[in-house]
C-alpha cells in the first residue's frame, strides 16, 4: 500500500510531485534545521484518489491518526484539548505554486471549550475569541461554501456599532458576539451547527482542500499557466504559530532578491499583530521589511541569516513566508520565487558571476516566454512629460499597458471580448478576480504591497501591474476612482499604467521599443544597454553556442528578411509567395484567373514575373549567403477575387447595365467557389491545374538568383512545393522546375544550384515520407495544415467556435495550433523524419508552421532531430534561446 502521509522530517525538496511544492520545501527547511513548526503532509496521490473515487483511500485515515498522535506528542498537547489546545492549519500545496487559488483553514481545534484554554494559555482573551471567529469564518467560507460577504458584513456591523473602521478596536466581547453571529450564519446557511469536534474539523478541511483543486478559479489559473489538470494538491497539516498575539508578533513575506529587478537586498513586507492571510490578501497595508530591524532586531537578524542559508542552499532567489510569535521567528513556507522576466535574466547572470551556477544552468534559468516579455514595448519617455500623471504606486509587474478603466472582473471580460483594451482597477484583487486579470491589459490596485495577490498573480502571468496606489480612492460601486489631485476617472476613460515605474497616467501614452529589441536590432550595443541588455546578450551568446538546431524566419519581403537576420535568423524557412500577390498586384492575378485562352494566361503570367523576380532579388540580398526557402503559391485562387455575395448583389442591382468585367468576375467566382477551400484547389494541385503558374514562379526565382550572383552576391534558393500528399505530385512539378532551372542557367550563363523540396503538411505525406523523399531534397513541416488535417479542425474556425469549451473540459491544456500536439501531430512528424532519412540520409529537415516559435514545440523539434525551426521574425530570439535550452 502506498504511503499517504509524510512527516516534515521525512520529505525533501525533490518530492514535489508527491508532497507539493509547499510540503516538499517545509520538509527541506526542517531538515536544514530551520525553525519550522512541526507537521505532516498528506500526498497528492491521496488527493488524486479522493477526486477520482469521492472517498479517501484505505489506510489514509490510519496514517493521519498516527502522524497526528506523533505531532501531539511532540507538542505536548492534544488537538483541541480543552485546557491547552493544539491548533493546526490545513493548507493546500500543489506541485506548481498557484497563489491564492486553493484553500487554507487556520486555527483548527478551537471550539466552545478550547477557546477558554487558548485564552488562558495565551493570557489574552481577545486573541482567543478573534482566533475562534477566524476559524468559523474561514471554515464557513471554504469548507461549507458560505458566501464570505456574510461574515465580512457582520464584522462591518460590529465595527459600526463601535464607531470604528479598524478591526484592532474590537475587543474580546465583540469577538465573542461575532462568534455567536457566525455560528448563526452557519446554521442558517447549512442547516447544521458548526462542527465542534476538532478531528471532524480537520478531516472536513482536508477534503475541502482536495476539492479546491477543481474550483473554477484554480482551473482557470492552471489553463493560463499550462499546469496539467490531473496533478492534484497535497495537504499540509501544521502546528499553528500566531502572529496576532500582540505587537511583539507579526507576519511577513520576504524575497532574497528584488523580484522585480533581481537586485540583492532586503525585500518584503511585514505586518505587526496579524495572522498569515492578512498579508497576501493585501487587506491591510504593510510596512517594508527593513522596518522589522527597528521593531524586533533579533528576529530580523535571524531572518537575514536564514535568507542567506536558503539562497545558498537552493542556489536561486527564494521567497519566504514567516511569522513571529512573541519574538520567536517561525518559517511557514519557502520556494524558488516567482520573478519578473528582467529579474530572471539578471539573477541568472548574478548567480553565474557569484560562481553558484554554470553557464548552462544560467541559460536554463530563463525561458523564451520571459524573453518575449522583455521584447514588449514600453512607454516612450519623451512623451511622458506631456502626459497627466495621476499617481505613482508600486511597480509590481513591468510593462506598459493602455486601456479603458474598468472596475469589475465581469466588465473586464465583457469589454475584452468586444476587442477593447482594458485596465482592471480594484482596491485590491482576490482570487475571484482572476478572469478579469486574464482579460485585462494591466491591473491597478490602490492597496496591498508587492506581495499582494494582484502583484504575485500579475507577475506570474507576465501582466503589467501597478499596486498599492494609495492616493487613489477607488469606488467600485460607482465605477470610478478619484486621484489625489481631484481628477475623476470613470469606467471607459483611458488610462496608461507603467509597471516598471509604478506611474499611472490619464489618457493614452505612446509606447516605444524595449531596449532588448533595440539591442537585437543592432541599434544598442550590449555594453551600452545596461545590466539587463548585457545579461540578455550573455545568455543568448551561450544559448547560440549550445543550440544544435538553426533558427530561420518566415518572411516574404525584404524588410522582414533584414529584420529577421538582425534578430539572428540563419535564413528564411518560409517565404509565402501568395503574400506577394496582394495590393495592386491582385488585379494581375484576377486577369490570370479570367484568362480564356493560353495567350491571355501567358500575358498575365508575363506581367507577374518581373515583379516576383524583383521581390526575390531583395530577399536574396537581405539573406545573402543564407538559405531562402521560397514556397510556391498555396491558397485557393478565389481568395484573390471579390467576395461572392457582394459581387452578386452588385451585378443583380445593375441588372442589364452590369459591367461585362463584373459579369466575367462573377462567373469565375462561381466557378472557383468551393465548399471546403482548405481541402480544395490549393498548393501543388493549383500548380498542376493552372499551366504555367509554378513555372513562372520558378523562372522568377532562378533569374533573381542569377542576377544576384552576377552582382557578386551569394543567393541560396530552396524551392518548396506545398500541400503534397503523393510523391507523384511532387515528381511532376519537380521535373518541370528542374527543366526551367536548367533553361535559365543556360540563358544567363550563371548556374545557381537550388534545392527542390516539399512541405509535409498532410497526414498522407507524413506516412509516405519515405517515397516522397525520393523526390525531395528537404522537408519542411507545415504544422498549421498538419494540425488542421490530423485533427480535422478547420484552422480558421475552431478556435473561436469551441476551443474554450475544449480547454474547459481539459481535452487539451493548450490549443494544438499554438503548441504542437506531440502524441498525434508529433507522431506523424516523427514517422516522416525517420522514413525521410531512411530514403535520403542527408535530407534537410525543418518546421515552418507557427509552432516553430513556440517554446514547448521548439523542444519537440530538437528531440525529434530537425535541423532548423522557422518562425516569425519577432519570435526568432525566443526560438534561438529555446533551441539552446533544448540542447542543454
Ligand atoms: C503550414 O501549414 O504550417 C504552413 C506553414 O503553411 P501555411 O500556414 O501558409 O498554410
Ligand atoms: Mg500550409
Image (cartoon, grey):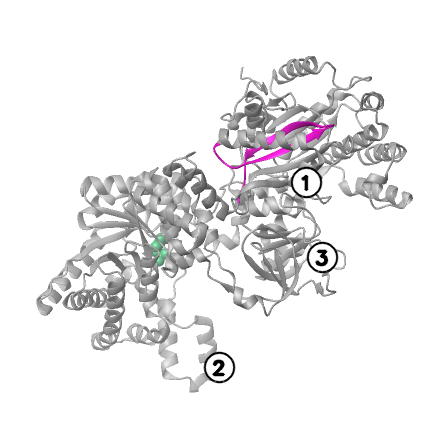
Name which residue lies at 20% across and 61% down.
Answer: 715
Using the image, determine if residue 605 lies above or below residue 80. Answer: below
- Tell me the number on the disc at residue 653: 2
Q: Nearer the viewer, mark 2 or mark 1?
A: 1
**Is residue 319 rendered magenta in the image?**
yes
Residue range of the region highlighted in magenta in the rendering: 315-339
Label 1 CB, ligand 1: below 8 Å?
A: no
Q: Nearer the viewer, residue 483 or 8?
A: 483
Residues at marks 2 and 1 touching, judged by CB atoms closer than 8 Å: no
Is residue 213 among the parts visible in the rendering? yes
Q: Which residue matches tag 1?
A: 291
Q: Nearer the viewer, residue 734 or 357?
A: 357
In which quadrant of the rendered view does residue 547 lie?
top left
Q: Nearer the viewer, mark 3 or mark 2?
A: 3
Residue 598 picture location, percent across and down: 21, 74
- Element type at marker 2? helix
Earlier sequence position, callout 3 versus callout 2: 3
Q: Is residue 790 left or right of residue 382?
A: left
Label 2 CB, ligand 1: below 8 Å?
A: no
Q: Is residue 15 left or right of residue 870?
A: right
Name which residue lies at 66% across and 65% down.
Answer: 493
Q: Nearer the viewer, residue 860 or 536?
A: 536
Using the image, determine if residue 45 lies above or below residue 375. Answer: above
Q: Which residue matches tag 3?
A: 472
Q: Is residue 774 left or right of residue 183?
A: left
Amino acid at each position: 500500500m502506498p504511503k499517504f502521509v509524510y512527516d516534515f522530517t521525512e520529505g525533501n525538496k525533490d518530492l514535489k510531485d508527491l508532497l507539493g511544492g509547499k510540503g516538499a520545501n517545509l520538509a527541506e527547511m526542517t531538515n536544514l534545521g530551520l525553525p519550522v513548526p512541526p507537521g505532516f503532509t498528506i500526498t497528492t496521490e491521496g488527493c488524486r484518489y479522493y477526486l477520482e473515487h469521492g472517498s479517501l483511500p484505505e489506510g489514509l485515515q490510519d496514517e493521519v491518526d498516527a502522524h497526528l498522535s506523533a505531532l501531539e506528542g511532540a507538542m505536548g498537547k492534544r488537538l483541541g484539548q480543552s485546557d491547552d489546545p493544539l491548533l493546526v492549519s490545513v493548507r493546500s500545496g500543489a506541485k506548481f505554486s498557484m497563489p491564492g487559488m486553493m484553500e487554507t483553514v487556520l486555527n483548527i481545534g478551537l471550539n466552545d471549550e478550547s477557546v477558554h484554554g487558548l485564552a488562558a494559555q495565551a493570557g489574552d482573551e481577545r486573541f482567543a475569541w478573534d482566533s475562534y471567529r477566524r476559524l468559523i469564518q474561514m471554515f464557513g467560507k471554504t469548507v461549507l461554501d458560505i458566501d464570505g460577504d456574510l461574515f465580512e458584513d457582520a464584522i462591518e456591523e460590529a465595527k459600526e456599532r463601535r464607531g470604528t473602521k479598524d478591526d484592532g478596536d474590537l475587543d474580546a466581547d465583540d469577538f465573542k458576539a461575532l462568534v455567536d453571529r457566525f455560528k448563526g450564519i452557519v446554521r442558517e446557511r447549512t442547516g447544521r451547527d458548526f462542527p465542534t469536534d476538532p478531528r471532524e474539523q480537520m478531516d472536513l478541511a482536508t477534503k475541502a482542500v482536495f476539492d479546491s483543486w477543481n474550483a473554477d478559479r484554480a482551473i482557470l489559473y492552471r489553463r493560463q499557466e499550462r499546469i496539467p489538470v490531473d496533478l492534484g494538491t497535497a495537504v499540509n497539516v501544521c502546528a499553528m504559530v500566531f502572529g496576532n498575539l500582540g505587537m511583539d508578533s507579526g507576519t511577513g513575506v520576504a524575497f532574497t532578491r528584488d523580484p522585480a529587478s533581481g537586485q540583492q537586498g532586503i525585500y518584503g513586507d511585514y505586518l505587526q499583530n496579524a495572522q498569515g492571510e492578512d498579508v497576501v490578501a493585501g487587506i491591510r497595508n504593510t510596512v517594508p521589511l527593513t522596518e522589522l530591524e527597528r521593531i524586533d532586531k533579533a528576529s530580523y537578524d535571524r531572518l537575514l541569516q536564514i535568507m542567506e542559508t536558503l539562497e545558498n542552499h537552493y542556489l536561486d532567489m527564494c521567497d519566504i513566508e514567516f511569522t513571529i510569535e512573541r519574538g520567536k521567528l517561525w518559517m511557514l513556507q519557502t520556494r524558488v520565487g516567482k520573478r519578473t522576466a528582467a529579474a530572471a535574466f539578471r539573477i541568472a547572470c548574478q548567480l553565474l558571476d557569484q560562481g553558484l551556477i554554470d553557464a548552462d544552468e544560467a541559460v536554463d534559468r530563463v525561458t523564451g516566454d520571459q524573453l518575449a516579455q522583455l521584447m514588449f514595448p514600453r512607454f516612450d519617455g519623451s512623451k511622458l512629460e506631456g502626459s497627466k500623471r495621476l499617481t505613482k504606486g508600486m511597480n509590481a509587474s513591468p510593462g506598459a499597458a493602455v486601456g479603458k478603466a474598468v472596475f469589475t472582473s465581469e466588465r473586464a471580460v465583457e469589454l475584452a471580448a468586444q476587442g477593447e483594451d482594458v485596465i482592471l482597477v480594484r482596491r485590491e484583487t482576490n482570487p475571484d478576480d482572476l478572469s478579469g486579470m486574464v482579460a485585462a491589459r494591466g491591473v491597478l490596485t490602490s492597496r496591498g504591497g508587492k506581495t499582494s495577490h494582484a502583484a504575485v498573480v500579475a507577475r506570474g502571468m507576465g501582466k503589467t501591474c501597478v499596486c498599492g496606489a494609495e492616493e487613489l480612492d477607488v469606488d467600485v460601486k460607482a465605477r470610478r476612482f478619484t486621484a489625489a489631485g481631484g481628477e475623476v476617472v470613470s469606467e471607459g476613460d483611458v488610462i496608461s499604467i507603467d509597471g516598471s515605474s509604478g506611474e499611472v497616467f490619464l489618457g493614452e501614452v505612446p509606447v516605444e521599443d524595449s531596449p532588448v529589441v533595440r539591442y537585437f536590432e543592432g541599434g544598442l550595443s550590449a555594453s551600452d544597454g545596461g545590466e539587463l541588455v548585457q545579461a540578455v546578450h550573455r545568455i543568448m551568446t551561450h544559448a547560440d553556442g549550445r543550440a544544435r538546431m538553426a533558427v530561420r524566419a518566415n518572411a516574404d519581403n525584404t524588410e522582414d528578411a533584414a529584420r529577421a537576420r538582425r534578430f539572428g535568423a540563419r535564413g528564411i524557412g518560409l517565404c509565402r509567395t501568395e503574400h506577394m500577390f496582394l495590393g495592386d498586384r491582385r488585379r494581375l492575378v484576377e486577369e490570370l484567373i479570367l484568362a480564356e485562352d493560353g495567350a491571355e494566361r501567358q500575358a498575365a503570367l508575363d506581367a507577374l514575373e518581373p515583379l516576383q523576380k524583383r521581390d526575390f532579388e531583395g530577399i536574396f540580398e537581405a539573406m545573402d549567403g543564407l538559405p531562402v526557402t521560397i514556397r510556391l503559391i498555396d491558397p485557393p485562387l478565389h481568395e484573390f477575387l471579390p467576395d461572392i455575395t457582394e459581387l452578386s448583389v452588385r451585378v443583380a442591382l445593375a441588372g442589364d447595365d452590369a459591367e461585362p468585367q463584373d459579369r466575367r468576375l462573377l462567373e469565375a467566382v462561381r466557378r472557383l467557389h468551393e465548399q471546403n477551400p482548405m481541402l480544395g484547389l490549393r498548393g501543388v494541385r493549383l500548380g498542376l491545374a493552372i499551366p504555367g503558374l509554378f513555372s513562372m514562379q520558378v523562372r522568377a526565382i532562378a533569374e533573381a538568383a542569377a542576377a544576384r550572383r552576377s552582382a557578386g552576391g551569394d543567393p541560396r534558393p530552396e524551392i518548396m512545393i506545398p500541400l503534397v500528399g503523393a510523391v507523384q505530385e511532387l515528381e511532376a512539378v519537380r521535373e518541370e522546375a528542374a527543366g526551367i532551372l536548367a533553361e535559365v542557367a543556360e540563358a544567363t550563363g550563371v548556374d545557381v544550384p537550388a534545392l527542390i523540396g516539399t512541405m509535409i503538411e498532410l497526414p498522407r505525406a507524413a506516412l509516405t515520407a519515405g517515397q516522397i523523399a525520393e523526390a525531395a531534397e528537404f522537408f519542411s513541416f507545415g504544422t498549421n495544415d498538419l494540425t488542421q488535417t490530423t485533427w480535422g479542425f478547420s484552422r480558421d474556425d475552431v478556435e473561436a467556435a469551441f476551443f474554450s469549451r475544449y480547454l474547459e473540459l481539459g481535452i487539451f491544456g493548450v490549443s494544438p495550433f499554438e503548441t504542437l500536439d506531440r502524441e498525434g501531430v508529433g507522431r506523424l512528424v516523427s514517422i516522416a523524419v525517420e522514413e525521410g532519412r531512411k530514403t535520403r540520409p542527408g535530407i534537410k529537415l525543418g518546421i515552418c508552421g507557427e509552432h516553430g516559435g513556440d517554446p514547448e514545440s521548439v523542444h519537440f523539434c530538437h528531440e525529434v532531430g530537425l535541423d532548423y525551426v522557422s518562425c516569425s521574425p519577432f519570435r526568432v530570439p525566443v526560438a534561438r534561446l529555446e533551441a539552446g535550452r533544448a540542447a542543454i
